[in-house]
Amino acid sequence: MPKIVDHEKQRRRVAEAAMRIIRRGGLEQASVRNIAEEAGLSVGSMRHYFASQAELFAYCMNLFLVQIEERIKAMKFDGPLLTVLKQLIFQFLPVDEERRTEMEVWFTFNAKTLVYPELKELSDDIYKNLLNISGMVIDQLIAHKLAKPGLDADIEREKLYALIDGLAIHSMLRPDVLTPDRLETIIDQHLQSLCGEAPESPA
């Protein structure tokens, strides 16, 4: 009997191989031949799963969105609210090896949106998700009556979005300065600053 190949599983295998190569040597090393070798496939069979390099990059970028969504779905939304909100924010920050790898490759792919316009929509999607998460954090503080009086939800959503985005970039550029512990302290303090005089402890 002919061997049955899981097409989607193989596509993900190729994408993960591409991301490993990009992280090790940069996007310029992500040739069809190098990716095929990393994935343990022939060049011809790899092209069966992705018709072009742009299609492969688009799949990789979408994979980031899927991984973030999977982590959020796996979260347990119990315990102190500030702790839950902090963990939600952490899904977009390089606080462990998995997320650092994602960020490194994601920033590399973003540079390619100028070359491959079809990647721009996917790049925009993750930033829209981050903006939505920022809005969710603010809305939850307001809904649970933890937000300080007079808080402007729209402005605070934009500020939190900018803070998370900026921390992600600077943590990648200066990992020795913006360590995971340092990131946690900054997020803790920012969430506390959004609350009234007696917010629940983030610990």
Image (cartoon, rainbow, N blue to C red):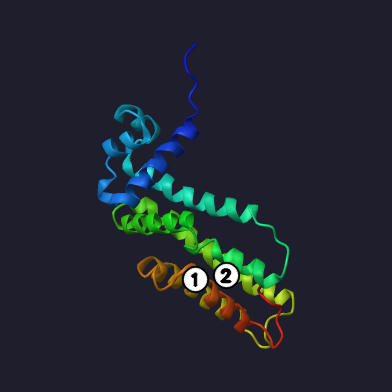
Q: Which mark is residue 76?
A: none
- Crowd tier of the residue under label 2, counting other residues whose Cα lies within 10 Å: few below 14, some 14–19, many 20 or above: many
Judging depth in this view, the residue of 43 and 38 nearest the camera is 38
Above or below, 25 against 174 in this view is above
Q: Could you tell me which secondary element the residue under label 2 belongs to?
A: helix
Which residue does the image show at 35% across and 68% down from the upper left? 173
- Residue 109, placed above or below residue 31: below
Between residue 117 and residue 103, name the one nearer to us: 103
Amino acid type shown at disc 2: Ser
Q: Residue at x 28, y 38 (%)?
A: 34
Residue annotated with mark 2: 134
Observer-nearest residue: 178 or 187?
Answer: 178
Left or right of 33, for residue 181: right
For marks 1 and 2, give the CA distance: 9 Å
Q: Tell me what residue is drawn at x 50 percent, y 21 percent.
A: 4
Badge 1 is on which residue?
Answer: 164
Q: Which percent across, then down, holds residue 35? A: 32, 39
Quarter of the rendering occupied by the C terminus = bottom right
Mark 1 belongs to which amino acid? Ile
